[in-house]
Image (cartoon, rainbow, N blue to C red):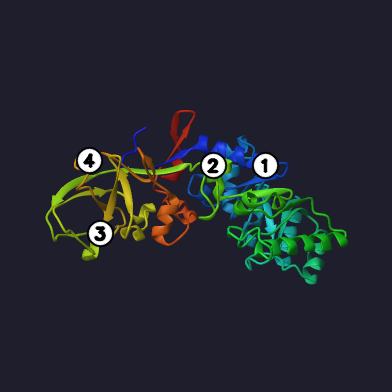
Amino acid sequence: MDYKRVWAEISLDAIGRNVASICQRVRPAKLLATVKANAYGHGAVEISKTALYNGADYLGVAICEEGVQLREHHIYAPILILGYSPDPLLDLVLRYDLIQTIFSMETAAALSQAAIRRGKRAQVHIKIDTGMSRLGFLPEEKALEEISAITRMPGLAVTGVYTHFAQADSPEALSEGDFTQEQFQRFHDFLTALQGRGVHIPLRHAANSAALLSSPVYHMDMARAGIVLYGLAPSANADLRGLGLEPAMSLKTQISLTKTIGAGVSVGYGRTFLTKRQTRVATIPVGYADGFSRRMSQGGRVVVGGRFASVIGAVCMDQFMIDVTDNPQVKAGDEVVLLGRQGGCVITANEMARIQDTISYEVVCGIGRRVPRVYHKNNQSFKTEEYI
């Protein structure tokens, strides 16, 4: 299949191996594969199918619409909405048998009423805020009363309860007095208090990618794997080698034009780069609208002809330029790797993140929807149309 402007190659074989390895790590706990934000840019439908085939038990999405997309592609596994669903979307939550996170009495009451109208019973998971200060009930006496009341609301089945760690990717994650341990203790104590009220919730979960790597004590009944599914580390200090995880995504394009310009000539908008010598410039038909950040203008590089080449000038919306003076054999039409490997040269999401002063999550999530995703599985390739 011939996609010549830009394309993201996704190895479903790598995803499958990653999921199987993570499952082995967390068993007997269940595994939730987090596929929100279009599976961190990798394509939610194909990643979800691959994750489930290789052992994942649940899928996690951020919003109702993401869950609906999976159901409409005939994915029937349990899907947990990790975020907020406005009242007008609660009928969709019920229609598509999605599991809604509950973090307030108001949301619980609205979903209960919607379930009664539909004659259905909605599964819900309760979110406890142990220190993220985002969504969730604070682990206080008031929450004990409210959650007890929610378990008695008609039309609701409270099947899970969870919290989210704020600092599990810290190098101190297992040290005494670490905030992750503090959060975990708060969660444990609150669950004990709930049980003292006669509230027994069957599925308890807390571990995100960093926590499932750091200690099995956090696995509980289910672990939620996010960035590690895609072979990327949750932080610079995380070690993935023991699990054998591998990045699943490469981003590729081709040279559209080469030209030679003299010394002292400006390149790109704002004339931010002036050549210091006669320079061979290659134009790349990709820009920040595709997810190649404008911050890559300073210090960014690509791989072409088996060698690194520096970005010169400001990255444009749809194009940028590189210096190929020392790589004279490259020509228009040659493949360029923006993320991934070519020969012995590798550009990682972490490298790109450092240049952009961000994290690898944002790098892969930011790859635009006009970039086709080309999937590789069992030495075969195919492309899905939903990302055009």
Question: Helix, strand or loop at disc 2?
Answer: loop
Locate the N terminus by quadrant: top left
| Residue at 80% from the left image edge and 71% from the top image edge | 141
What residue did someone put label 2 on?
245
User: Label 2 to label 1, Cα distance in Å?
Assistant: 19 Å
Q: Is residue 302 left or right of residue 67?
A: left
Residue 88 image position (x, y, % from top left): 62, 60
Residues at marks 3 and 1 touching, judged by CB atoms closer than 8 Å: no
User: Label 2 to label 4, Cα distance in Å?
Assistant: 33 Å
What residue did someone put label 1 on?
57
Q: Is residue 240 left or right of residue 9?
A: right
User: Amino acid under label 4?
Assistant: Val
Residues at marks 2 and 1 touching, judged by CB atoms closer than 8 Å: no
User: Label 2 to label 3, Cα distance in Å?
Assistant: 35 Å
Residue 17, image quadrant: top right
User: Label 1 to label 4, Cα distance in Å?
Assistant: 47 Å
Question: Helix, strand or loop at disc 4?
Answer: loop
- Crowd tier of the residue under label 3, counting other residues whose Cα lies within 10 Å: few below 14, some 14–19, many 20 or above: many
Q: Which-is-in-front pick, marks 2 and 4?
A: 2
Q: Which-is-in-front pick, marks 2 and 1?
A: 2
Residue 364 image position (x, y, % from top left): 46, 51
Question: Helix, strand or loop at disc 1?
Answer: loop
Rendered view: 48 above or below 181 = above
User: Amino acid under label 2?
Assistant: Leu
User: Amino acid under label 1?
Assistant: Asp
User: Label 4 to label 3, Cα distance in Å?
Assistant: 20 Å
What residue did someone put label 4 on?
330
Mark 1 and mark 4 lie on one chain; the one further toward the N terminus is 1
* Residue 73 appears in view: no
* Residue 382 appears in view: yes
